[in-house]
């Protein structure tokens, strides 16, 4: 249970960092980006979790897929099921992610101190890597982000299995995501 709690808090820290990036990229003075929605955040989570840091030797630390390790292929792209459940059940501590927007539940960012410094640094590094690959991706709407994630073969293969089985989702093994050709725009 603690592992899942840390995953959810790590996700919220990622959202916090994405919002900071958006504000910098757009010189926005508004507190929250108007185009951030549940769907766009879930796509940004996948893209940030999968991005590789080639300066790290340990394959398990090159990305955030050890933390965000439960992706499934769904109609609109990869979804981290544990995070999705926390969003839908409204059990996040800092944010509330709706279908059309994001809202702040708590402005107490001290909660992020519960994460290890290593976890916070890994998330910051992944966000910076994504930013270096495509500085404008933070401005993309949900449809544009879905289109990017649909280019990933790991999603296509898992979705093919889901459709073949007549189910709405299929697991995306971490290894298949790691071996995939990465697309960011």
Image (cartoon, rainbow, N blue to C red):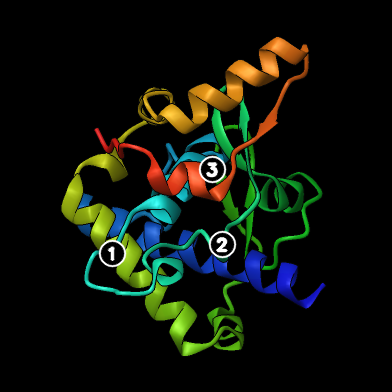
Asked if residue 27 shows in the view, the reply is: no
Front tag of 3 and 1: 1
User: Across the whole image, how many numbered discs are drawn on residues?
Assistant: 3
Asked whether the residues under the numbered discs 1 and 2 touch, taking CB atoms below 8 Å apart as contact, a structural biologist would say no
Q: Quadrant of the C terminus?
A: top left
SS class of the residue under badge 2? helix
* Residue depicted at 65% across the width and 20% down the height: 161
In this view, the residue in front, 26 or 136, is 136
Quadrant for residue 19, please give it.
bottom left
Q: In front: 160, or 43?
A: 160
**Residue found 61% across the figure and 87% down from its top:** 114
Query: Residue 171, located in which quarter of the rendered image?
Result: top right
| Vertical placement of residue 165 versus 128, above or below | above
Q: Residue at x 56, y 62 (%)?
A: 11
> Which residue is identified by label 3?
42
- Residues 165 and 119: in front is 165
Q: Earlier in the sequence, mark 1 or mark 2?
A: 2
Give the distance between the C-alpha atoms of the residues marked 1 and 2, in whole angstroms: 19 Å
- Horizontally, residue 150 falls left or right of residue 57, namely right
Q: For residue 53, which numbered disc appears in the image?
A: 1
- At mark 3, the secondary structure is helix
Mark before the other along the chain sequence, 3 or 1: 3
Residue at the spot of label 2: 11
Q: Is residue 53 above or below residue 43?
A: below
Q: Position of residue 140 (x, y in %)?
A: 32, 34
How many C-alpha atoms fall within 10 Å of the one at disc 2: few (<14), some, or many (≥20)?
Answer: many
Q: Is residue 61 at all visible to an observer of this figure?
A: yes
Going by the image, does 82 lie left or right of 17? right
Q: Position of residue 136 (x, y in %)?
A: 20, 42
Q: Earlier in the sequence, mark 2 or mark 3?
A: 2
Quadrant (top left, top right, bottom left, bottom right) of the N terminus: bottom right
């Amino acid at each position: 249970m603690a592992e899942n709690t840390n995953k959810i808090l790590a996700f919220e820290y990622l959202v916090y960092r994405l919002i900071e990036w958006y504000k910098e990229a757009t010189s926005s003075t508004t507190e929250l980006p108007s185009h951030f929605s549940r769907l766009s955040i879930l796509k940004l989570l996948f893209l940030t979790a999968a991005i590789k840091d080639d300066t790290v030797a340990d394959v398990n630390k090159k990305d955030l897929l050890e933390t965000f390790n439960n992706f499934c292929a769904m109609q609109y792209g990869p979804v981290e099921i544990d995070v999705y459940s926390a969003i839908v059940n409204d059990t996040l501590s800092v944010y509330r992610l709706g279908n059309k927007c994001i809202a702040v539940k708590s402005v107490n960012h001290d909660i992020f101190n519960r994460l290890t410094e290593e976890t916070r640094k890994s998330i910051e590094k992944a966000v910076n890597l994504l930013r270096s690959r495509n500085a404008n991706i933070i401005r993309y709407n949900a449809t544009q982000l879905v289109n990017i994630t649909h280019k990933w073969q790991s999603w296509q293969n898992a979705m093919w299995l889901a459709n073949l089985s007549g189910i709405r989702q299929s697991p995306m093994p971490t290894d298949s995501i790691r071996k995939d050709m990465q697309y960011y725009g």
